[in-house]
Image: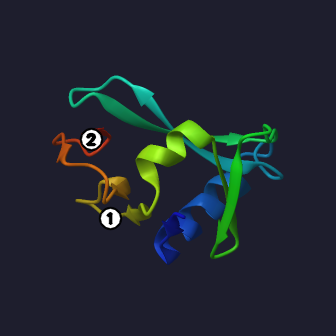
Amino acid sequence: MIQISTSAAKRITELKTEDPHAKDKMLRVSVTRGGCSGYSYKMDFDLQKNETDRIFEDHGVQVVIDSKSLLYIAGMTLDFEGGLNGKGFVFSNPNANKTCGCGTSFAI
């Protein structure tokens, strides 16, 4: 239901390697109210899987998403842009009809 680019998978793996507490955790992607466009993306490492969570795996990275957030981000691609002008993690969400300039907030 969501895709992870090879560059995002590589960066997530690097972050897990850098943080000894994140080694065995899954990447949790969720949506919260807030931000300049109405909803914001949230990413964190998590060990727990709740009853209504869905787990996806792409490029060797396990991603856990709660059922409410999945309604907003189904079909999304998570990418990573590095370098001097890179933005970091980039959310390409086909469900968003408006996004803010920073790319972490969106509207449906």
| Residue 104 versus residue 76 in the image, above or below | above
Looking at the rendering, which quadrant does residue 60 occupy?
bottom right
Is residue 21 toward the left or the right of residue 35 in the image? right
Which residue is at the front of the view, 101 or 93? 93
Looking at the rendering, which quadrant does residue 63 occupy?
bottom right
Query: For the residue marked with disc 1, what is the amino acid?
Result: Gly
Q: Which residue is mark 1?
A: 83
Query: Mark 2 falls on what kind of element?
Result: loop
Is residue 20 toward the left or the right of residue 104 in the image? right
Q: How many numbered marks, from 0 up?
A: 2
- Where residue 105 appears, as percent x and y from the top left, is 29, 37
Query: For the residue marked with disc 2, what is the amino acid?
Result: Ile
Q: Which residue is mark 2?
A: 108
Which residue is at the front of the view, 74 or 57? 74
Mark pair 2, 1: CA separation: 30 Å
Q: Which corner quadrant holds the C terminus? A: top left
Is residue 104 toward the left or the right of residue 47 in the image? left
Query: Mark 1 falls on what kind of element?
Result: loop
- Where residue 54 appears, as percent x and y from the top left, is 69, 52
